[in-house]
Image (cartoon, helix red, strand yellow):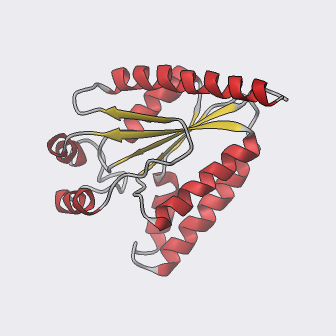
Amino acid sequence: MADPDLIIHINGWPGCGKLTIGRELAKRLGARLLDNHLIINPAEALFDRGDPLNHSLRKALRSTILADAAQMKPGTPLILTDALSDDAFDAAVFDEYRSLAAARRATLVAVVLDCSPERNAERLVAGDRAARHKLTAPMVLASLRANYRLLRAPGLPLVELDVSDLAPEAAAAILAERCRSALELGRGNAERAR
């Protein structure tokens, strides 16, 4: 049996820096990066977010992409980004990532990025977020933060990091170290299972 692959799921509020940090982390780990907007944006190009066809298209796109990701060359780390809450719908979405990890015999590490509400609101309106069709409405972000809690997937290695005052490079360095530790732990568990 080969050593387990590594899949890192970066979860955080819109605007906390998931994509920017994910890019830096991918460079450090030689990983592929699958940003959640690669799935969201095509669906929103055709259907408003509240339209049932938006939901069904996103589900179909995610299923197709994850089925192909299961066939990636072994040993290629994969980083996923998302903004999932701890409700049943989002937990079911995360179960698709668990299935991907099982299909790849991968160690799945759940990363939760957080930052202060003030810093989060600043980042939400900065850069090219609007051009990338990302959320830029501070009131929507405030409502999300007030009414939901970020998903912390049970039964997996969990890395939580407050990125309020961290540069993306520094955050990626910390995450790379912690995720490598989780992978080593996964390898140790695979050895014991033999």
Q: Nearer the viewer, residue 99 or 25?
A: 99
Horizontal arrangement in the rendering, residue 11 relative to residue 61 (left or right): left
- Residue closest to the far left: 118
Q: Quadrant of the N terminus?
A: top right
Q: Is residue 105 visible?
A: yes
Residue at the image point whose x is 50% and y is 62% from the top: 42
Q: Position of residue 158 (x, y in %)?
A: 48, 37
Horizontal arrangement in the rendering, residue 153 relative to residue 15 (left or right): right
Residue at the image point whose x is 51% and y is 59% from the top: 91
Q: Nearer the viewer, residue 191 or 63?
A: 191
- Residue closest to the far bottom: 52
Q: Quadrant of residue 63?
A: bottom right
Q: Position of residue 119 (x, y in %)?
A: 18, 40
Residue at the image point whose x is 25% and y is 39% from the top: 115
Q: Position of residue 124 (x, y in %)?
A: 24, 48
Q: Quadrant of residue 34?
A: top right
Q: Quadrant of residue 149?
A: bottom left
Where 64 falls versus 4 (above or below)? below
Tally of marks: 0
Q: Position of residue 143 (x, y in %)?
A: 22, 63
Q: Quadrant of the C terminus?
A: top right
Horizontal arrangement in the rendering, residue 3 relative to residue 58 (left or right): right
Horizontal arrangement in the rendering, residue 36 relative to residue 108 (left or right): left
Q: Is residue 70 visible?
A: no
